[in-house]
Amino acid sequence: MSDAKPKPKSGWLNIAVDYGPIIVFFAVYKYYSPADRENSVAEVLAVISGTVSFMIAAVIALAVSKWKLGHVSPMLWLSTVLIVGFGGLTVLLRDPLWIQVKPTAIYLLFGVLLLVGVWRGKALLKILLEAAFEGLNDEGWMKLSRNWGLFFLVLAAVNEGLRYWLSFGDWIAAKLWVFLPATFLFTFSQIPMLMRHGMALNEKEEVLQNPPHE
């Protein structure tokens, strides 16, 4: 009789852990955002309030992941550290630039790491996702690492474009209505390839509920 503990099911709680903080950020910013966008003092206050809430929510999400899911993924650790780091710079310098470039930094870091890993013959995504996809063979992990590496670089470029062309409020909205749907569509698009490379049928829902994220 095996004494191994069953792997905890994340369900939609994992999505709340991943994307809850950015939703909190958006809600708090919109609550404090002034009707008159020319009021720079009030706009900065809204950004600071949203950023502080973002940092607190990110730390809470990390704690919930450890408490309810039984683990904290390397990607969540890194994302939380960068949120707190860049968020702290935003608060201290009173400049929203830092919270805006945080996603670019994460996407570039992950994208470069994954592609360098593929170039060296190592599927680093397998380590980051803690071998979550049962049955996926080495070739599947390599292709998944390559595809996500390229996708992260695309997201970095898109984030910089939106940061340059959009107001801060519209940029925050884009985080919810552009990046989140794009991530799930891309994740869904990988399922046929994963199935061809041995991913177990009962892991399909796990893929959709646990996409790599910023």
Image (cartoon, rainbow, N blue to C red):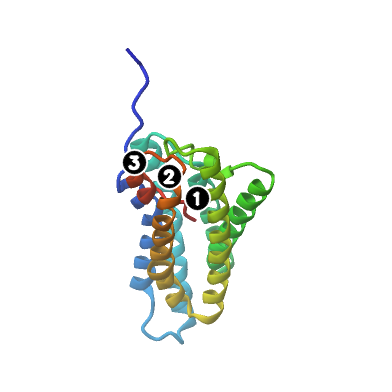
Relative to 33, is 195 above or below? above
- Closer to us: 41 or 54: 54
Of the residues shown, which amino acid type is indicated by label 1? Thr
Q: Which mark is residue 201?
A: 3
Going from N to C along the chain, the mark reached first, 3 or 2, is 2
For disc 1, the neighbor class at 10 Å (few under 14, some 14 to 19, many from 20) is many
Tell me the CA gap for discs 1 and 3.
31 Å
Quarter of the view holding residue 64: top left
Which residue is at 48% across, 37% downward?
A: 131
| Crowding at mark 3 (Cα within 10 Å: few <14, some 14-19, many 20+) | few
Compared with residue 62, is residue 5 higher up or lower down, i.e. above or below? above
Q: Residues within 10 Å of mark 2 (few under 14, many from 20)?
A: some
Q: Quick one: SS at disc 1? A: helix
- Quadrant assignment for the N terminus: top left
Q: Is residue 129 left or right of residue 33?
A: right
Looking at the rendered structure, the kind of residue marked 3 is Leu
Marks 2 and 1: in contact by CB < 8 Å? yes
C-alpha span from label 1 to label 2:
7 Å
Mark 3 and mark 2: span between their CA atoms?
Answer: 29 Å
Pointer 1 or 3: first along the chain: 1
Name the element at disc 2: helix
What x and y, as percent, mark residue 130?
49, 37
Element class at badge 3:
helix
* Residue at screen point 54% across, 75% down: 163
- 69 and 198: which is toward the camera: 198
**Dot 2 corresponds to which residue?**
62
* Residue topped by disc 1: 80
